[in-house]
Image: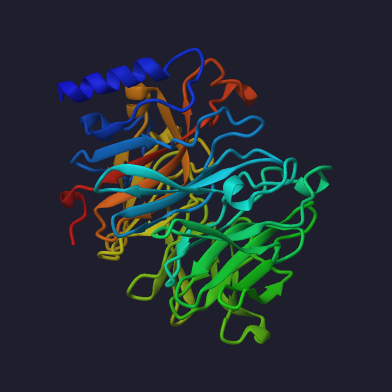
């Protein structure tokens, strides 16, 4: 404990300064404290707090070697956990010449390894468009390749004089071979590819697009990765997220918020197009399908259950634990199927509720905070975890990985609108869930 206290003190001395140091210095491994279970605000009625403090590991992404101007270091795509590995992505959000990076974290060795970066893989001429974001999910295909899509840093990238924007890229990286390849450039012309999910068995990548001129509504893209061609596209696309069933069906609606009837796409019958179904859900984020054939979706302060066999849905009620309701990543415990994990306040503001990692018990319909990461890490190392678009649960259900948008305190920390704290640094946390907090 004395050694850990010394490490934390040194890190704090380095990070809380007048000017940020790039790359960010220091890391915390194995931090655990009763302070992680102390709320910072008023919790809603019925919300529980874990009784056992978890171990929390924190590391900074080492690609952050420069101040991202005019962009900001941030993470917008959902990562995934495979075995002992966690795959994730962050970027500098710059435009037109940005960059984004894909990482693998090994929970055994506690090593965070950079796998690839877009600028190096795309090799665009100077001045041409290079994406500053990976906004899609990362998906590992049955062929061993990690698939993802790219996204703009500016909402009107097509109007930039030197960018020569044609559309965004579908990419893949082979973790074992260390290869990165372009799968397709501009599969739909002049469209960015922010919303994306992979069918790992059928090797179809699905995307909801964003218009390069920011004039059209999102389109729907189904891309056959084996044949390297568009399987189907439609002017109606998902605004935020998609439901992917194990039987291959894809479901979505085009509303940015609130519940709405779903559209279904059957990859075995692509010419049939999109079919409306009766079930309505909110769909800002969706879990993977459980072994019982259920997918869970969330929009603001409401959780839904969707049955993939009967194509019926029901509301399960509230998700918030405090003042924050915006949730963009929702993952279930694959070991038991009983628990969901998420972090309210995805786009900043999570710290108002203590940056809580929430466990939702599907059996009891109860919400429990496993850990409050704020102000614990601000006090220890000067880092404020502000929100997350990437939460992933290990196959064993014993670890929850999170890539944070956050703030290292410096002289410009409160230079945003209204003096609010703003993003400047991405960090990875691993919360080890105590066995006593996840009974079968």
In percent of the image, x 62 and y 23: which residue is there? 418
Name which quarter of the figure residue 357 lies in: top left
Picture quarter with the C terminus = bottom left
Kindly tell me whether residue 297 is visible in this rendering. Answer: no
| Furthest residue in direction top, as rendered | 18
Q: Residue 262: where, in percent of width, then height? A: 59, 72
Q: Residue 65: where, in percent of width, then height? A: 51, 30
- How many discs mark residues in the rendered view? 0
Question: Residue 415 or 191: which is nearer the viewer?
Answer: 191
Residue 279 lies left or right of residue 294; in this view the side is right
Q: Residue 104: where, in percent of width, then height? A: 39, 50
By what rule are the colours in the image chosen?
A: rainbow
Picture quarter with the N terminus = top left
Vertical arrangement, residue 421 with respect to residue 10, above or below: below
Residue 58 lies left or right of residue 96; in this view the side is left
Residue 56 lies left or right of residue 250; in this view the side is left
Vertical arrangement, residue 424 with respect to residue 434, above or below: above
Residue 153 lies left or right of residue 433; in this view the side is right
In percent of the image, x 29 and y 18: which residue is there? 9
Q: Residue 7: where, in percent of width, then height? A: 26, 22
Kindly tell me whether residue 349 is visible in this rendering. Answer: yes
In percent of the image, x 22 and y 41: which residue is there? 54
Question: Residue 357 or 360: which is nearer the viewer?
Answer: 357
Name which quarter of the figure residue 307 lies in: bottom left
In percent of the image, x 43 and y 37: which residue is there? 61
């Amino acid at each position: 404990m004395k050694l850990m206290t010394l490490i934390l003190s040194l890190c704090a001395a380095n990070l809380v300064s007048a000017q940020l140091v790039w790359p960010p210095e220091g890391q915390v491994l194995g931090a655990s404290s009763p302070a992680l279970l102390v709320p910072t605000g008023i919790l809603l009625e019925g919300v529980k707090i874990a009784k056992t403090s978890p171990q929390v590991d924190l590391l900074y992404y080492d690609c952050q070697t420069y101040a991202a101007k005019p962009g900001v270091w941030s993470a917008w795509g959902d990562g995934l956990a495979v075995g002992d590995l966690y795959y994730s992505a962050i970027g500098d959000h710059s435009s037109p010449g940005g960059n984004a990076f894909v990482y693998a974290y090994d929970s055994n060795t506690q090593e965070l390894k950079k796998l690839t970066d877009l600028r190096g893989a795309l090799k665009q001429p100077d001045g041409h468009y290079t994406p500053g974001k990976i906004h899609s999910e990362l998906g590992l295909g049955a062929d061993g390749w990690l698939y993802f899509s790219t996204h703009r840093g500016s909402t009107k990238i097509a109007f930039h004089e030197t960018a020569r924007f044609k559309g965004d890229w579908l990419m893949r990286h082979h973790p074992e071979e260390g290869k990165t390849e372009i799968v397709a450039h501009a599969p739909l012309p002049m469209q960015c590819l922010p919303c994306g999910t992979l069918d790992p068995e059928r090797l179809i990548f699905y995307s909801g697009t964003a218009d390069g001129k920011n004039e059209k509504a999102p389109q729907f893209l189904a891309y056959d990765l084996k044949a390297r061609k568009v399987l189907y596209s439609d002017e109606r696309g998902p605004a935020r997220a998609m439901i992917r069933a194990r039987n291959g069906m894809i479901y979505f609606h085009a509303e940015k918020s609130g519940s709405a009837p779903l559209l279904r796409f059957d990859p075995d019958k692509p010419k049939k197009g999109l079919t409306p179904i009766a079930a309505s859900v909110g769909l800002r984020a969706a879990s993977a399908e459980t072994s019982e054939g259920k997918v869970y979706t969330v929009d603001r302060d409401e959780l839904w259950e969707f049955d993939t066999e009967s194509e019926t849905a029901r509301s399960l009620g509230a998700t918030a634990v405090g003042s924050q309701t915006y949730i963009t990543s929702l993952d279930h415990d694959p070991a038991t199927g009983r628990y969901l994990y998420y972090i309210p306040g995805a786009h900043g503001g999570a710290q108002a509720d203590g940056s809580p990692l929430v466990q939702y018990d599907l059996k009891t319909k109860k919400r429990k905070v496993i850990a409050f990461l704020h102000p614990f890490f601000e006090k220890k190392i000067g880092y404020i975890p502000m929100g997350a678009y990437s939460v992933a649960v290990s196959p064993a259900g014993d670890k929850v990985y999170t890539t944070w948008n956050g703030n290292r305190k410096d002289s410009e920390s409160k230079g945003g609108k209204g003096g609010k704290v703003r993003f400047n640094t991405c960090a990875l946390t691993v919360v080890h869930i105590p066995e006593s907090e996840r009974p079968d």
